[in-house]
Amino acid sequence: MASKVTSAIMRQGLAVLWVSIRAEPVVFTFAVLASGVYGLMTVASAWALGWATEHVVLPSFADGDVAGGTVAAGVALIIGVALVKAGGVAFRRFLAGVMQYRMQARSRREVTRQYLRLPLAWHHRHPTGQLLSNASADAEAAWAPLAPLPMAVGVVVMLVAAAVAMVLADPVLALVGFLIFPAIALLNMVYQRRLSPLAARAQQLRAEVSEIAHESFDGALVVKTLGREDLEAARFQAKAHELRDANIAVGRVRGLFDPMLEALPTLGVLAVLLFGAMRLESGAVTAGTLVQVAYLFTLLAFPIRALGWVLAELPRSVVGWSRVQAVLEATGSMSYGTAVIDGDSPARLEVSGLAYSYGDAPVLRDVTFEVPAGRTVALVGPTGSGKSTLVQALVRLVDPDEGSVRVDGVDLREVERGGISRAVALAPQHTFLFDDTVRGNITLGLPVPDEDVWAALRLAQADGFVSALPAGLDTKVGERGTSLSGGQRQRIALARAVVRRPRLLVLDDATSSVDPQVEAKILYGLRDAAEASTVVVVAYRMATIALADEVVYLEHGRVADRGPHEELITRCEGYRNLVTAYEREEAERAALNQDQEPDDELDELDELDELQDLQDDDIEGVSA
Amino acid sequence: MTTAFQGIDRSALATVRRGLSLTPEFRRGLAGTLALAVVATIGKIIVPIAVQQTIDTGLKGSVPDVPYIRTAVLVCAAAVVLTALAAYWMNVRLYKSTESSLATLRTRGFRHVHDLSVLTQNTERRGALVSRVTGDVDQITTFMQSGGLMIIIAGGQLLVASVLMLIYSWQLTLLVWACFLPLAVALPRFQRWLSGAYTTVRERTGDVLAAVSESVVGAAVIRAYGSEDRTARRVDAAIEANRAAQTRAQRIVATVFPLTEIMAAVAIAGVVLLGVRLGLDGGITAGRLIAFLFLITLFISPLQIATEVLNEAQNAVAGWRRILGVLDTPPDVADPGEDGVTLPRGPISVTFENVGFAYPGGPQVLHEVSVEIPPRSRVAVVGETGSGKTTFAKLLTRLMDPTGGRVLVDGHDLREVRFSSLRERIVMVPQDGFLFDGTLADNIRYGRPAATDEEILLALTELGLADWLEGLPAGLETRVGQRGESLSAGERQLVALTRAYLADPDLLLLDEATSAVDPATEVRLARALEGVTRGRTAVSIAHRLSTAEAADEVLVFDKGRIVQRGPHAELVAEPGVYAGLYASWAATTGSR
């Protein structure tokens, strides 16, 4: 069973290697050639040494005299072979690296291209950490065997050459080699097979230790404020000890196999000396041959282990490759039409019968409303009512399961690629800034004059702090905008949305981190500037809602009611509850102060619950 | 980059000495491990000796002396097995001692990070702190188990080979050394090139990760603004720069690595040349000369791995330095421990006496704050962003110590109160409801580890959150995900609040603890809190002024000072900061 699985992995692993060979045939060919040279020259260096022993060393000690030409030939042979061998090693190493890094870069490019192509719905289904490791660790693991691969091929050449050389030298001594070298290769395979699950477990535990440290330090404030340092230390220690034990287990296997792998060729040399002496006695071999074969053993002992390295990397490679492949084979990229919705005037928006689910959980159901050109609509609803998903559908970050979103009568799915972002802009709830300058973050590469950028910053109430930055518009904001406060980041994101003078502007609670005073100024500014755009704004603050011509009130993924704020507040309980929560609280407290009996408070709480229930019933009634 | 940690500029030797003093498990039995290493090294010279014996003694006559050779080979084989056993034993000892000592070091480092004040923690990036107890320790381990061991083995190998060579012929030994010496001298330079090239690779790899993560984390923005191509170009540039750096590093390795092979060949050729010239008169025999050829191969691998080992050694010292930097940084907010005061249970009073605070090297953020919070009172703290509200909260919970004046609880200076007592009686709920990866119950129980499920349910019910709990798919067993990300920001705050409430403190401090909850829920929660904080002292840092309206007293912060205090009704009537804050709050939330 186990061997079946392993041979399947081997097959897959070789298939992965074959992919890389087809992708980089020239580099691979030269790397293998260089490695072949290295393999042949390794055997040749033993032969050169044997030759020098036979023709230079032994005669000179036996006769005390050797021709100068022979000595020179021996020296030239030894150095010449070494130079060619060193060249082989250098090119083998370099080209193996070139191939490995090219394949890595290729996978990384393909994976990120795919990330940029796949729809947001796909992104929602995959955790960020996983996507990042697909592009980094997995792409690296997939091509890790490429580093030792040419060497392994060279070792095969070396072994064949060594076998030939040994057989030519003496069949009996060759027999010792034929026993020892397969034994080393076999032992090494057993070693790698024993080691790799242990090493994988240690690797896993290392990640877990790191996870605990990350989580614990991230939550340092909670740990501190509740005085749970000892508890955390105990949790970390338990995992650190597991890691220690796993590493010791790895060490035991290493500690056992490494000395065995060293001892085996040494024993081989000893056997060669013994059997060689006997063959010498019968006159079948010369002393030079004996030295040559013994030397070959010492030279081959180490490289032969390269075969094991490739085999050891294969399972990891297969896992990395299949993870990368899963991303590359993911389907569901958005299709685009040819329609154009460009123009200078505000756009008309129609949403009809829109439904959307995350997996089995419906988030939006039969959402229908329209926004006439140039008007402002507020989307209001409690947390989890589907506002953000609806917003994503409005700018076609997701396609509805049912129904449609139309701008000026054109279904967004029929708009040409890039057409929507020219006409529609979104300021999302979670601000995202690129590791770029303030200007770059606002223009995103569009050719926008600086006056327009400043105008957008003024509208977003961001001109003040941006002009105070050390390099103004050219200030780098750092990774994810870490050098700015939350409110500042939101204002830059807002400027990004308004600078392109969109025909439809969608604001998803885009000022939540801004101080109330500043927020008020932004909203007034937007009202004045909004004539050029149709605006959809997600909000539950009164000041924001006051900007809107109409309110669409969402609950449980449906439009529970819509109309002007004044109408909704009188006829829609849920809406009233949400937007007047603070006012009611104050009124109730005033009543409480007049009548100090605590029971009243409880009664009122119950009353509030009843209202809530009633309102829920209402909604059920509407949907039925 | 600045760091708050100590001893970063310590010398390499001092670092290692101090590091070893912290790892007694490693030092214990080190002598035995080293002795085994010496025995294991002898295994390396068995082959040259055997070759020499065979040629010089066994093959001396016209007919090989097979019995002699057989005996020699058997003795050598036994020695091989013995040295292999010694190597095994040495490896196991080494792994055990290094892993044990480093696990201890890791845990100590981890614990110490938690003992450091929030201030010190925040000066370092979180990721950097994590690598102190992970990557940095791993680098030390790698060195001790591979590089450090190799130095011992390779050094021993060179030593025993040289000794044997000297016994055979001092002239040839000098020749061999002369061939390898230039390489050894040049090694540090190669290592500098290489470590420079690897540093560039690491930086470029970081750039790739940053660029790729933009395309993942910023997916929505990239699509909404149609900037896929622009992002792809940025990612491509980062990937290409990384590949180029990797290739450059590989070129250096590929150039330097085979140099030893060439030098070895020169040495071999030289030995043959000089050896036959010296001849028998020079005291050299054929067997000894040939043994030299085998001994030279022992020089190759130590020199080939030397650059790598030097790199590892450098990394390990840097790792030591960084983790020692953490361990040697004294906690600036220290627990008085056994000598400290234990506060009795019961409602808490708080007094701020001329309290001032400034971040190190920064301007004063709190000036001369004096205020008294009587037991059982409910106080709201209001003010604009940056007015000093949060600093006030951190001083009150002793996450930081004041730089002037003092904070008293029940008449005791906070600095004299034992942490165990302080953390039990005063609990703060921070704004971001941080949750640990686990179930809802696990997270709430973090407030009181001994609490039963019934007690947790009771706490949720008392806070009016039973309905919310019912709406969750798996109730208390709902998994919250990493950092609680499976829950909404508002829900995380609900859990954090329940967690603090379950801890049953005598003073509850809420730092905008319900800012992400929707208004209807927030109002219900505020009412529930009013009930459950009765009998306790409660301080709320308020972002919505409805909280202030309900408080006994409002403290108004502006530019690091308390500029107004009193009940809402009084403050709102008088002209001042509070009236202004209230007016703009009313304008954004209500229709007054």
Image (tube, coloured by chain):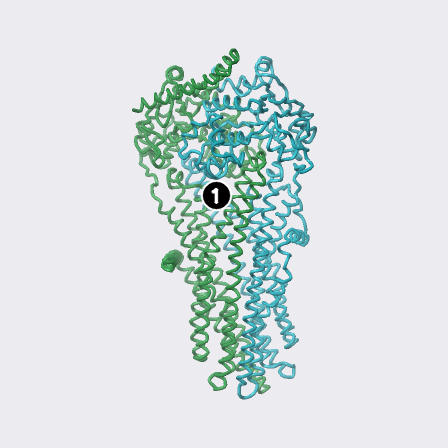
How far across and how far down the image is residue B227, in percent? 42, 38
Which residue corresponds to the image point at 43% horizontal and 78% vertical from the top-left? A167
Q: Quadrant of residue A619?
A: top left
- Residue positioned most to the bottom: B62
Q: Position of residue B82 (x, y in %)?
A: 56, 70
Question: Residue A22, can we see it?
Answer: no
Task: Give the chain letter for green.
Answer: A
> Residue B562, position in %: x, y?
64, 22
- Disc 1 is attached to a residue of which chain? B
Name the image quarter holding the N terminus of chain B.
top right
Q: Position of residue A332 (x, y in %)?
A: 33, 41
| Left or right placement of residue B453 versus residue B302 in this view | left
Q: Colour of chain B?
A: cyan
Q: Which residue is mark 1?
A: B211
- Estimate how packed mark 1 is, as few (under 14), some (14 to 19) or many (20 or more) residues with alpha carbons within 10 Å: many
Is residue A262 placed above or below A501 in the rendered structure? below
